[in-house]
Image (spheres, rainbow, N blue to C red):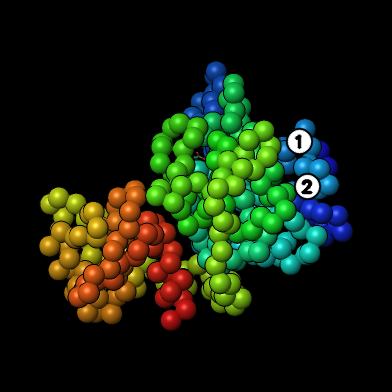
Amino acid sequence: MQASEAFTGSSRRTLLILGSGGTIAGLAPRPGDTLGYQAAQVGVAQLLAGFDAPPGCELQVEQVAQIDSKDMDAAVWLQLARRCAEGLAHAHVQGIVITHGTDTLEETAYFLQAVLAPSRPVVLACAMRPANAAMPDGPQNLRDALAVAAQPGARGVVAVCAGVVHGAADVRKVHSYRLDAFGSGDAGPLGYVEAGALRQLRAWPQAAPDPGLLGRLPAQPQAWPRVELVFSHAGASGASVDALVRDGVQGLVVAATGNGSVHHALEAALLRAQAAGVRVLRASRCDQGQVMGLPGDALPGAGALSPVKARIQLQLDLLAA
Ligand code: SIN
């Protein structure tokens, strides 16, 4: 492996590999172990041991975090985003790979695309089986991610899992167990990695960069706007919304049914919240499709954003306001 432990800024074409934890770095219990499965145990340098860099590239490795991604938070997002921005400020950094847990990967992907809008690739790599499994999927996923990051012309934040490349806006975890755990909904995958080569089907994620956005994010995550998710379902009530408003919430995303419909009791509470100055967004709890805005909608729709991505977008909108 041509890898170093810290980003030094050499002049070769570099792929920067940032470790953040997940099952790709996890360990299943061995006979006699008293602890159960644990994510985020193996360092990213160790995950890359024995790997060759893609032709013409060198790897530089840095452990940014070591967490189970269910515990992802704004502090780790900020660290990842800053390290990406610092790396991409060097012209010889061709791309970045981030090893990440699958559980909140889609949220990190959306956040990084929103705050970086990178003109080079930032590729999230993950695994469904731990590093010590009999047949781990992490090594192949990592190789595929390196191939995508080394691809000339690649740009934007994407995720690679089981040979499928997903764009940040579309990617969702769609299966709790199988190796091919992600989907891109109606949009479909961005491409496939086949024997180390990218077969691209759609354009790379593009967004108008907001150059100041990352710098404007408060350094203290407690200073970020508080945006919570509520769920519309049979028998829903407005109790949780009323409690959140009393508790000072600044934004609410409702995971609404179908095309953004909301149980009447919950809707009444959301309208009260909106009237009290809380920003409210309706996203659909359906895996595909979008919330079609209709004239006269009292609560704005989140379009094709999933509820968890709408939550991030609302936080960023509130920060920009
Ligand atoms: C995690 O998200 O960190 C644990 C689960 C996984 O990576 O599949």
Residue that appears at 40% across and 48% down: 185
* Mark 1: few/some/many CA within 10 Å (<14, 14-19, 20+): some
Q: Position of residue 72 (x, y in %)?
A: 50, 53
Viewer-nearest residue: 31 or 123: 123
The residue tagged with tag 2: helix, strand or loop?
strand
Q: Amino acid at mark 1?
A: Phe
**How many numbered discs?**
2
Question: Residue 131: where, in percent of width, then height?
Answer: 61, 31
Q: Label 2 belongs to which residue?
A: 59
In the rendered image, which quarter contains the N terminus?
top right
Measure the C-alpha gap from mark 2 to mark 1: 10 Å
Q: Nearer the viewer, residue 148 or 268?
A: 148
* Left or right of residue 194, residue 239 in this image: left
Using the rendered image of the protein, determine whether residue 68 is visible from the camera's viewpoint: no
The residue located at (24%, 79%) in the rendering is 276
Mark 2 near mark 1, Cβ–Cβ under 8 Å?
Answer: yes
52 lies left or right of 39: right
Tell me where residue 21 appears, x and y as whole percent: 59, 44
What kind of residue is marked 2? Leu
Question: Which numbered disc flags the more N-terminal residue, 2 or 1?
Answer: 1
Q: Quadrant of the C terminus?
A: bottom left
Residue at (49%, 29%) from the top-left corner?
A: 36
**Residue 120 occupies quadrant:** bottom right
> Which residue in the protein does label 1 denote?
51
